[in-house]
Image (tube, helix red, strand yellow):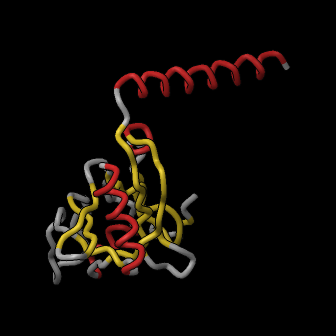
Amino acid sequence: MAEKRKSGMITHGTAAQNRKARFDYTIKETLEAGIVLKGPEVKSLRLGRATLTEAYAGEHDGEVWLFNCYIPEYQAGVLSRFEPRAPRKLLLHHKQIDRMLGAVARDGNTLVPLDIHFNERGVAKVTLAVGEGRKKSDKRQAIAARDWQRDKARLLRARG
């Protein structure tokens, strides 16, 4: 869980989460990547106001970038403005980039950002996943399994 100070800012923990990604994709492999941000973007992230629901990662000029991630402008700062949906560079080693992009090109998978979090040192990181898109029938099965688990837990709780 995200640890907050009195000011409401997140010092370490999850700042934004893409909960729908685990439903829409079968996650095969995850990887933690650094993200290049400006000062006001970090402050806005620390307030927990970012959105990852429509975000995706992709290759551009041999580097991995995060596209369509919404980080709203920091309201208290007036000196530095930024584009809320600007592409943001992800920091990975070349071997990691080659492995991830190879899996995407070879198997037709997608690079999906699962969350943006702050590590113990307070550095913003993105958890990337190689995911395979689920079909509608797979999604229905996932819903049925989740409903059954919830009903089973409810029955066991009522039983005593």
Using residue 48 as the reference point, say whether residue 142 is left or right of it.
right
Nearest to the observer: residue 154 or residue 152:
152
Q: Residue at x 35, y 25 (%)?
A: 136
In the rendered view, would you say 63 is above or below 24?
A: below
Q: Looking at the figure, which quarter contains the C terminus?
A: top right
For residue 60, which quarter of the picture?
Answer: bottom left
For residue 89, which quarter of the picture?
Answer: bottom left
In the rendered view, would you say 51 is above or below 34?
A: above
Image spot of residue 124 (x, y percent): 42, 74
Residue with the most extreme right position: 160
Image spot of residue 25 (x, y percent): 39, 42
In the rendered view, would you say 137 is above or below 103?
A: above
Using residue 44 as the reference point, say whether residue 142 is left or right of it.
right
Image spot of residue 51 (x, y percent): 31, 54
Q: Residue at x 41, y 77 (%)?
A: 95
Q: Looking at the figure, which quarter contains the N terminus?
A: bottom right
Nearest to the observer: residue 119 or residue 102:
102
Q: Residue at x 23, y 77 (%)?
A: 77
Nearest to the observer: residue 87 or residue 138:
138
Q: Residue at x 28, y 71 (%)?
A: 64
Image spot of residue 102 (x, y percent): 34, 63
Numbered-mark total: 0
Residue with the most extreme front position: 106
Using residue 102 as the reference point, say whether residue 74 is left or right of it.
left
